[in-house]
Amino acid sequence: MAGGWAMVPILICSAVALAIVLERCWTLRRSSVLPPGLGDEVRQWARSGQLDPGHLETLSNGSPLGELLAAALAVRRQPREIIKERIEDTGRHVVHQMERYLNTLGTIALIGPLLGLFGTVIGLIDMFMEVMRGGIGDPARMAGGIGTALICTAAGLTVAIPAYVLHRYFRSRVAGYCVQMEKQATALLDDLTLAAPAPARARRAPAPAPAAPSAG
């Protein structure tokens, strides 16, 4: 109330930032992104041939790591290059999902101080317009007006600083998850391709020995 109407966009940004932080904290839990033991379990499925469509659909819908591994298993009979390309394509989609709303959080961290500065400037303009119309009057009242105008700047920084810190934190967490997921996907890729026996090449029949020249 003391900051005036310019506090409204700052309060909206703070509510949006809080909602994003709570949603990302829940979505980016380690147990939700990288379920313990899932990579070993999936590789065991691949070795034992338990790869029916129901298994793959459940695996894909269970977690981001499961979606990545299920994409590799869906083309497991293809050459290594095709499996690797499918993993990379699915990995970009998975990373995009994990970084969902983080750009919005970064934008709030950027515009928070600007909104606070805007509110302060508007408050100072109103105060000096009052001075122009009625004179300086009470200096204590003028100082109180300046303090009221600065409330917007303080509010903007209060929203922006935690938003920036948490934005960097979530980006770092996603980067760490990507490294672990790449490690699990590479292990599965090796199991699917390197363990497969290479097709044996047909041996060429030895050329017949040249006939010995007859004695004339």
Image (cartoon, rainbow, N blue to C red):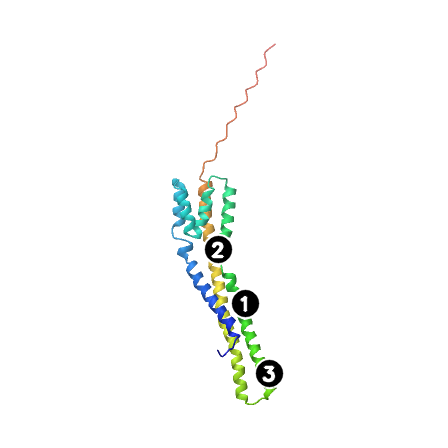
Which one is nearer the viewer's eye here, 204 or 16? 16
Q: Residue at x 49, y 51 (%)?
A: 91
**Label 1: element kind:** helix
Give how far across and how far down residue 152 sits, in percent.
Answer: 52, 76
* Amino acid type assigned to the residue bearing label 3 in the image: Met
- Name which of mark 2 and mark 3 comes first in the sequence: 2
- Name which of mark 1 and mark 3 comes first in the sequence: 1
**Label 2: element kind:** helix
Q: Residue at x 52, y 67 (%)?
A: 109
Give how far across and how far down residue 59 sits, in percent.
Answer: 41, 48
Give how far across and how far down residue 128 sits, in percent.
Answer: 59, 83
Mark 3 crowd level (few <14, some 14–19, many ≥20, 10 Å Cα): few
- Disc sitting over residue 132 in the figure: none
Report, in whole angstroms, how far the alpha carbon at label 1 lies from the one at label 3.
Answer: 30 Å
> Which residue carries the number 2 mark?
97
* Amino acid type assigned to the residue bearing label 2 in the image: Gln
* Amino acid type assigned to the residue bearing label 1 in the image: Leu
Give how far across and how far down residue 205 sits, in percent.
Answer: 52, 24
> Which residue carries the number 1 mark?
110
- Disc sitting over residue 129 in the figure: 3
Residue mark closest to the camera, 2 vs 3:
3
Residue mark closest to the camera, 1 vs 3:
3
Q: Dividing the image into 4 quarters, which one contains the C terminus?
A: top right
